[in-house]
Image: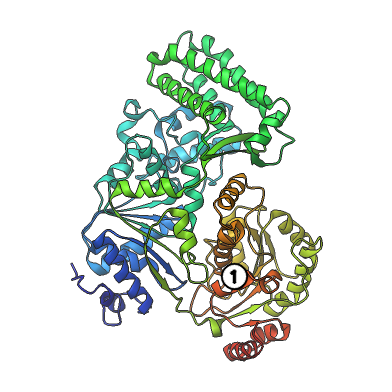
Amino acid sequence: MIDSEDIGALLGADGPFARELPNFAPRPAQQAMARAVQHAIAECETLIAEAGTGTGKTYAYLVPALLSGERVIVSTGTKALQDQLFFRDLPKVRSVLGARLKTALLKGRANYLCLYRLDQTVREGASMDRPQAEQLATIRAWSARTRRGDRMELAEVPEDSPLWLRVTSTPENCLGVECPFYEGCHVVTARREAQEADLVVVNHHLLFADLALKQEGFGEILPGAQAFILDEAHQIPELAGQFFSQSLSARQLTELAQDALSECNGMTGAIGLLLEPVQALQEAVRKLRLTLDPLPPRGPFGDLLQREGAQPGLRDVSDLLAALTDVLASQAERSRGLMNVHERAASLTERLDRIIEEHSAQDVRWYELFPRGFALHATPLDLAAPLRAMRERTQAAWIHTSATLSVAGQFGHFARQLGLDDPQTLSLESPFDYARQALCYMPDGLPDPSARDHTERVIDAVLPVLQASDGRAFLLFTSHRALRRAAELLTDRVPWPLYVQGTAPRHRLLEEFRASGHGVLLGAASFWEGVDVAGDALSVVVIDKLPFAAPDDPVLQARLEALEQAGVNPFMGWQVPSAVIALKQGAGRLIRDVHDRGVLVLCDPRLTSKGYGRLFLASLPPMPRTRDLAQVKAFFEHAPHGVADAADAAARGSF
């Protein structure tokens, strides 16, 4: 094991990483972050570390984590990043350090094949269509050879296949120790390995699901740890809202009904008792969804209650769910499966009553509508208190890191959202030479974003840039409506392949975009972050508007009203800082490597016409800015010296 006295030196020019890893480049910012993480773990402190793209933050936290001698949980933003960390980065760091520690990868149960549910699905397989029958045969063959049971191993069955819902479990339908397949259970195996490990790699969804369950008095899934390291921590405020909410969905109710009937197999008389209440509940859920159809996709619960027929519909669902729960109670002792369904029904009954009747002034009640379902929620107005209590219970170090946590160099907004009182902070600039690698182009004469023809004018302004770059662009939109309109406008006007979000799975669009070399990808929402396209395939990122949160978000509306009542300007105190962080994420797609070059096109005139625009510009990487299309063309026409010319010109006429 390597001496960890100077953790920064390990990552320096004379350290083992520089000696043993090809293409490893020592970075002072990486070394500074490693020292800060080491100190936070040792002193059990809270740290916010913003590390610009290219800093090497993964190694900067893995090295001190592995050398700390403490049990550490590392949480990432997505399952894909989780796999990358566990299978690519962690083995390299362990090898260089010679760290003989136990490590484990743990995901939510929906990622693991459930042998009991697979067996049930095989028995019911006669009713499947041919494609699903073929997918089921593929899953069965894989089940015989997989050790982990992680569905990410099986690329042959699409991630969005409905079959996965039938062969994975949920907390509600898991049979626990009474399952006939318990000894071979992949979820149990993964959790056991996590309990025994020194370092566990999880994702934010699992982390908060577990911590929220512990808050409610259930057993913990994750092992107790002395340190929690949260990568992509800018996602935490939104995710925490989901996991500290009370929620109930039409899907949960219909799955409960279906599982109740499935558990009747082999139980004499059970189907006769359960069929009628199950069908009545399913019909009530269907009717309620039809009643809500004219409402907007999401809104305050009060708007739902004012819809004619909604209150009687809710009462019907509540009464029929309670009636089904009573019938299930009479059958619960007959099998573990029926007992499990009864427990789920009782839990959903309690949750529905709480959302409808027993709400607190501290909660925001709201609804969502989906094409075939709905969800009802009660979300805490202020997440700082439950998050602070959660951290205090762990008595651990908490390290939050991302490339986008600050607003004009200040961490106040992020810290307030999470209830972080007097945290240690660290801001590390990207090592990339933005002055020479990048150019920010802000086209002149674009209308206000609310103008009816804004998207048309954006496309007109962007087309000359795409011609100069020969495609190779991301066009990022703040709404799906604008995205669809832009796709219509570009379809017959560009010679490059177009990749439009929604026409294929996200991963496939990205693979095809990278392979094309000259593609133009149009995306919204999920394409603003977590997308890494290094090299020549991406040389332009266009952002149509400042990414302010949707004004129809009922939780946001309630929070803004609460801020106003507390004497805080909700626009400058919440909306602007949140939009700044989102803009930084979108802009961060452009330069991913020391060799990348590209142009960031910002199409919102409020950046210069409004006072708050300065906050956005001050939060972006230090790249030259221009309104001159000729400088954009020069950037692409000339080799790197053209960037310097553009930088000099932009500096002379900066705004």
> Which sits in the foreground, 384 or 635?
384
Q: Is residue 125 visible?
A: no
Amino acid beneath label 1? Phe
Can I make out residue 227 in this image?
yes
In the displayed structure, would residue 211 be above or below residue 403?
A: above
Quarter placement of the C terminus: bottom right
Viewer-side residue, 468 vs 265: 468
Question: Total label count?
Answer: 1
What is the x, y in percent for residue 322? 52, 18
Position in image of residue 290 (x %, y %): 71, 29
Q: Secondary structure at mark 1?
A: helix
Q: Give the image quarter of residue 3.
A: bottom left
Q: Is residue 551 above or below residue 289?
A: below
**Circle 1 Cα neighbour tier, 10 Å, few/some/many (<14 / 14–19 / ≥20):** many
Residue drawn 27% across and 45% down?
Answer: 195
Residue at 39% from the left image edge and 38% from the top image edge: 213
What residue is shown with label 1?
616
- 292 and 553: which one is in front? 553
Q: Position of residue 465 (x, y in %)?
A: 71, 77
